[in-house]
Amino acid sequence: MEVLVPFSTDRPKSRLSDVLTSDERGAFALAMLRDVLDAIVAADGDPRVLATGPVASDLHCPVDVDERPLTPAVNAALDAHFEGAADGPVAVVMADLALATPAALRALFAAGREADVAVAPGRGGGTNAFVVGDPAFRVDYHGASYLDHRRIAADAGLSVDVVDSYRLATDVDESADLAEVLVHAEADAGGAPGATTSHAARWLRDAGVSLDTSSGRVGVARE
Amino acid sequence: MEVLVPFSTDRPKSRLSDVLTSDERGAFALAMLRDVLDAIVAADGDPRVLATGPVASDLHCPVDVDERPLTPAVNAALDAHFEGAADGPVAVVMADLALATPAALRALFAAGREADVAVAPGRGGGTNAFVVGDPAFRVDYHGASYLDHRRIAADAGLSVDVVDSYRLATDVDESADLAEVLVHAEADAGGAPGATTSHAARWLRDAGVSLDTSSGRVGVARE
């Protein structure tokens, strides 16, 4: 399955500015993108990065550059998919799903082969990933896009399946979200943080960002 | 399956004090408890509330009162389960999982019949729900309890399965979490908020709490 991964190279992850500098945010965003691409390939998806500008040359997948905002860029990419030679549905997976696993993505892809639209909602009413097999579907990422996308699908008479995954619901936007990256990388590595295969978690550790369990909800601290 | 639902009657949901009064927080916590109990029954679980004090008499399930903090109260209840006549595993599901669905709970219960411990992590490293079939397992809800519980299980030689569910990962603690209740109640009701079967969402609507999509991440506003 073709899997589009939108990636912003223009001031990425600005809401992490309380913990990371501008250059660091760019490097961390790239580490998360690598994790997402790895998970897609492991789930037998064919990733294609949809970037707003030039990105690292060692991503081992096609990169299309489209400077437009997210919504028109993704709609144009959906058009290109359905007008092109490739058959079947197409997926769109956000580049900041640092917790995405091959299993979670496989469940999404499978749901998208059954329903016209399969959607993985994100925290705060976002749309973190979806699969669509019908050109009548359009995206609109503004506001509570999960509700908007359900409405757009219903208005077009398309069947919808919702994929219930914490891994896919967790987009990494704010410093509290960094704790999610560290917690689950540590858990997945069997309690040995150094053994993680997560590029994002390794990047955070190298930058001196660690879990802070001193207060109620777990956060992060930086050396 | 026996399903314990810890419920605090002592200043519940204090982190919602920016939106709700003390009495309102108690009423809202009870509405969420009703949703959780409904979902457990629909998933063929047998709920038992483990409360710190007297609760509403119309919950249609057994209520045990234990004034102790969460960790010793749950450990004592686990002991009582494994020393009692009931066979098989026992589940512990938090009372503030207002988004819990029968499908998500069924997946948890099924995982808990295969592994020694099945756990649904919560946001911020919490443990929102688990199933255990072995008396060697103990809870410790302090700090990043998800990591602690994985360690406790590993130290006891118990197999662990992790249940990846956004529904079960979403405990409702802060005002931003109220948006989750409203978004998913509306989506589940096919875009008609008035048609929701969620006690918690109906309670919020009646209290004048509604979605606020005016800024980036979706929040709530109150009349």
Image (cartoon, coloured by chain):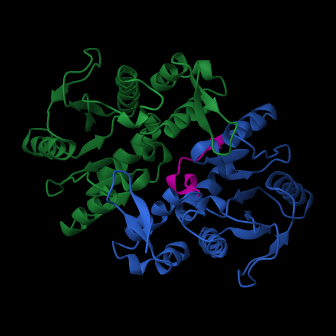
Chain colours: A green, B blue
The vertical placement of B151 against A61, above or below, is: below
Question: Where is the C terminus of chain B found, in terms of image quarters?
Answer: bottom left
The vertical placement of B70 against B143, above or below, is: below
Q: How many marks?
A: 0
Residue appearing at x 47%, y 36% in the figure: A99
Residue B169 magenta-highlighted = yes
Res A163 seen here: no
Q: Which residue ends up furthest to the left in the rendered image?
A: A83
The vertical placement of B85 against A64, above or below, is: below
Residue A207 position, x and y percent, is: 51, 18
Q: Which residue ends up furthest to the right in the rendered image?
A: B83
Residue appearing at x 53%, y 65% in the figure: B101
Question: Where is the N terminus of chain B found, in terms of image quarters?
Answer: bottom right
Residue appearing at x 59%, y 72% in the figure: B35
Residue B180 position, x and y percent, is: 47, 60
User: In this orientation, which residue lies closer to the viewer: A94 or B89?
Assistant: A94
The vertical placement of B202 against A67, above or below, is: below
Q: Which residue ends up furthest to the bottom in the rendered image?
A: B58
When asked about the image quadrant of residue B85, the answer is: bottom right
Q: Is residue B12 left or right of residue A97?
A: right
Residue appearing at x 58%, y 69% in the figure: B20
Residue A75 position, x and y percent, is: 15, 47
Residue B140 position, x and y percent, is: 78, 44
Q: Is residue A94 left or right of residue B130?
A: left
When asked about the image quadrant of residue A102, the answer is: top left
Start-end of magenta stretch: B161-171
Res A202 seen here: yes
Residue A92 magenta-highlighted = no
Q: Is residue B3 left or right of residue A209?
A: right
